[in-house]
Image (cartoon, rainbow, N blue to C red):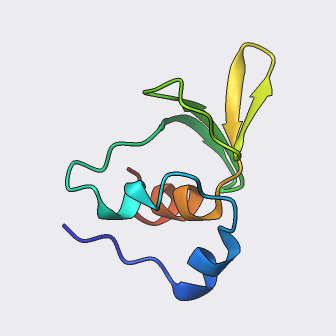
Amino acid sequence: MKLEISKDIISKTTKCTKNFDCLTNTHHIYCRVKECFQNEVHFVECLHDDYCSYRMAFGDSYVCNCPTRKEIYNKYKK
């Protein structure tokens, strides 16, 4: 299934260092959302320890601030 994300959301994702792999990889490998609050705060479990400019530590967890990743979850629950 091809993920459809608006150009507006993609244009807000200015710090992506992974070349939008979450949209182009056929296996859709990215951080797994463990919990989401009001479609705004996304707690994630990252599959890799690669640097991500959108990942922010929050206690023992991480929060994702990537507009594209958040939209993928909000729209497709993936």
Residue at (70% x, 45% y) in the render: 53
Q: Is residue 63 above or below residue 4?
A: above
- Left or right of 10? Residue 77 is left
Q: Is residue 12 above or below residue 44?
A: below
| Percent position of residue 27, x then y | 22, 48
Residue at (69% x, 68% y) in the render: 14
Splitting the image into 4 quarters, where does residue 76 fall? bottom left
Q: Is residue 64 above or below residue 1?
A: above
- Left or right of 75? Residue 15 is right
In the displayed image of the protein, which residue is found farthest to the right? Answer: 59
| Percent position of residue 68, x then y | 56, 64
Residue at (54% x, 86% y) in the render: 7
In the displayed image of the protein, which residue is found farthest to the top? Answer: 60
- Left or right of 42? Residue 60 is right
Splitting the image into 4 quarters, where does residue 13 fall? bottom right
Which quadrant would the N terminus be assigned to in this image?
Answer: bottom left
- Left or right of 9? Residue 60 is right
Q: Is residue 72 above or below residue 46?
A: below
In the displayed image of the protein, which residue is found farthest to the bottom? Answer: 7
| Percent position of residue 26, x then y | 20, 56
- The foreground one among 33 and 28 is 28
| Percent position of residue 12, x then y | 69, 74
Numbered circles on residues, count: 0
